[in-house]
Image (spheres, helix red, strand yellow):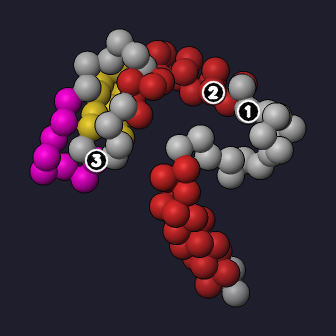
Amino acid sequence: MLMVRARVKGDIEHFFPSAKVIRMEDADYLYRTILPRNTVAAVIAKTVDAINYCGAHGTSFKSIVDKRRAPFYLNVWDTMAEMQDRLNV
């Protein structure tokens, strides 16, 4: 079994529609579920297989469907780029 966690409501259900998701107010990730390892692996494999960098959106792996998430993703990207620069000197 694996624990799948999410910070945004509905993200787990997007990939695992039948999952029983619980909300834990005092946890670092508000939402979580426990699923069989093979179920999680199958969804990850299907998602990876569907990656198409030459798709209709132009497309960059940075394409975001929910544009409200863009500034948060950009902050993560900036932080990780900074780490790369500082630790690879």
Task: Tell me what residue is drawn at x 61 percent, y 46 percent.
Answer: 64
Q: Earlier in the sequence, mark 3 or mark 2?
A: 3
Q: Earlier in the sequence, mark 3 or mark 1?
A: 3
51 sits to left or right of 36: right
Task: Tell me what residue is drawn at x 78 percent, y 40 percent.
Answer: 57
Q: Which residue is labeled 3 in the image?
A: 29
Going by the numbered disc 1, the residue's amino acid type is Ile
Q: x and y percent of residue 6 in the render?
A: 36, 41
Going by the numbered disc 2, the residue's amino acid type is Thr
Task: Tell me what residue is drawn at x 48 percent, y 16 percent.
Answer: 38
Question: How far apart are labels 3 and 1 at the CA level?
Answer: 26 Å
Q: x and y percent of residue 77 in the render?
A: 59, 65
Q: Which mark is residue 41?
A: none
Question: How far apart are labels 3 and 2 at the CA level?
Answer: 22 Å
Q: Secondary structure at mark 2?
A: helix
Question: How far apart are labels 2 and 1 at the CA level?
Answer: 7 Å
Q: Which mark is residue 47?
A: 2
Q: Residue furthest right?
A: 54
- Judge whether residue 82 can be spotted in this image: yes
Quick check: is 44 in the magenta stretch?
no
The residue range painted magenta reads 22-29
Q: x and y percent of residue 76 in the render?
A: 52, 64
Q: x and y percent of residue 43 in the render?
A: 54, 21
Crowding at dot 2, Cα within 10 Å, few <14 / some 14-19 / many 20+, comes out as: few
Going by the numbered disc 3, the residue's amino acid type is Tyr
Quick check: is 23 in the magenta stretch?
yes
Q: Do the CB atoms of the residues marked 2 and 1 lie less than 8 Å apart?
A: yes
Q: Residue furthest left?
A: 26
Quarter occupied by residue 12: top left
Quarter occupied by residue 17: top left
Q: Secondary structure at mark 1?
A: loop
Q: Which residue is labeled 1 in the image?
A: 51
